[in-house]
Amino acid sequence: MKKFSSLLTLTLAFVILLAGCSQKSNTPANSNTPQNASTEQNSDSKDENTLDKIKKAGKIVIGTGGNYRPFNYMNEKNELVGFDIEWGNIIAEGLGVKAEFITGQFSGLTPGLLAGKFDILLAGVNVTDERKKSVDFAEPYGRDGVVAVVNKEGSNNPADINDLQGKVVGVIGGATAQAVVKGIGGYKEIKEYPGGTEVFKDLVNKRVDLVSIGQDAAGDYLKNSPDGSKLEIAGEPYTIVDVAIPLRKNNAALKEAIDKIILEKKQDGTYQKLAEKYFGFQFDK
C-alpha cells in the first residue's frame, strides 16, 4: 500500500510538472504579438514627414554658408543673395511656403541638418559617395569641379590640382575640395578656412601656394573680386560632379516634391538661365 501511495504521489507530481512546462512554453508565443507590433510602430515612426511639418509651419528652413560666391554671399546691402538663394526661393514657392535661410560655416551645415536645425541645405554641396552615407540628395541643380587657383606671382605654383607635392594648400573646411586634396596627397600642409573670402585673401598674400576649390566659385572670384586679376586657375578641373540639395534620410515625400520642382525648372529653361547668370556658361548636363 505504501508503495502504491508513493507511486501515485510521483505520478501526480509528474503531471503537475508537465502542466507547468506547457504554460511556460505558451507565454513567449503570447508575448510576441505586442513586441512585434511595437517594433513595427518604431520602424514607422522613423519616417519624419518633414514635408508635412514644412507646410504646417508655412516655411522651409534652409541652411547655407553666406560666404561662398556665387552660390551664397552677402551683397553690398548686406542681403543674402546668390545661386543657392534663388534656388531656395524657387523651391519654397513650389512648395507653397516661404524660405527662411540660416547661415553658418560650411563644416557645421551637415551636422546642423542631421540635428534638425534645417529642413534642407543649399550651399553648393557636391554629391559624393561619402556624403550619401549620412544624407539623401535631391535632383541635382548644378555642376561643379575642383580646380587649383594660384597666385600669378607665386614661387611654388602647381601645374594643376594633381600637382601637390610639397605645397601648402588652402581649402574651405569640410568642402569636397578638401577631400580631393587628401585623396591626391603629397602636400606639405592643408590650411582650413571658413569661406572663400578668407582662403583667397591668404592666396593673394602668398600664405598658401594654391587654393583647392570648386571652379564655379573660383571663376566668380577671378572675375568679380578686386584681387581677382592677381590669381589664375592652373590646369583643368579634377572632376565634374553634381551639385545637389542634401536632406535627412527617410523623407521620401519631401525629396519627391523637390525633385519635381527642379525637373520642371530644367524643362522650362530656368536651370540653364541661372547657370548663365551666375557662372557665365551652361552646365554640361
Image: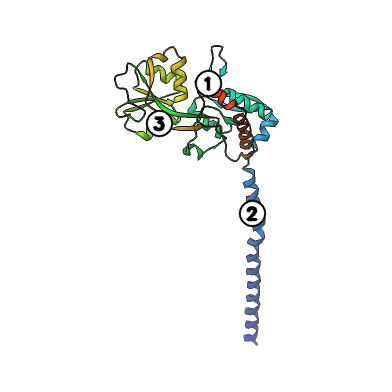
Relative to 117, 98 lies left or right = right
Name which residue lies at 69% across and 28% down: 96
Instruction: Compute the Cα span from label 3 to label 2.
Output: 50 Å
Name which residue lies at 35% across and 31% down: 162
Instruction: Compute the Cα span from label 1 to label 3.
Output: 21 Å
Q: Secondary structure at mark 2?
A: helix
Name which residue lies at 66% across and 71% down: 19
Q: Amino acid at mark 2?
A: Asn
Q: Amino acid at mark 1?
A: Tyr
Q: Is residue 117 visible?
A: no
Q: Amino acid at mark 3?
A: Tyr
- Of tags 1 and 2, which is closer to the observer? 1
Q: Quadrant of residue 58?
A: top right
Q: Which residue is mark 1?
A: 278
Residue 284: give x, y in percent of width and height: 50, 30
Looking at this view, name the residue that lies furthest to the bottom.
1
Q: Secondary structure at mark 1?
A: helix
Q: Quadrant of the N terminus?
A: bottom right
Q: Which residue is mark 2?
A: 36
N-term-proximal mark, 1 vs 3: 3
Relative to 44, 84 lies left or right = left
Q: Quadrant of residue 238?
A: top left
Q: Quadrant of residue 188?
A: top left
Label 1 packing within 10 angstroms: few (<14), some (14-19), many (20+): some
Name which residue lies at 44% across and 11% down: 226
Q: Is residue 31 above or below residue 185?
A: below
Looking at this view, is 275 or 30 the one in front? 275
Residue 179: give x, y in percent of width and height: 41, 33
Q: Which residue is mark 3?
A: 238
**What coloring was used for the rendering?**
rainbow
N-term-proximal mark, 1 vs 2: 2
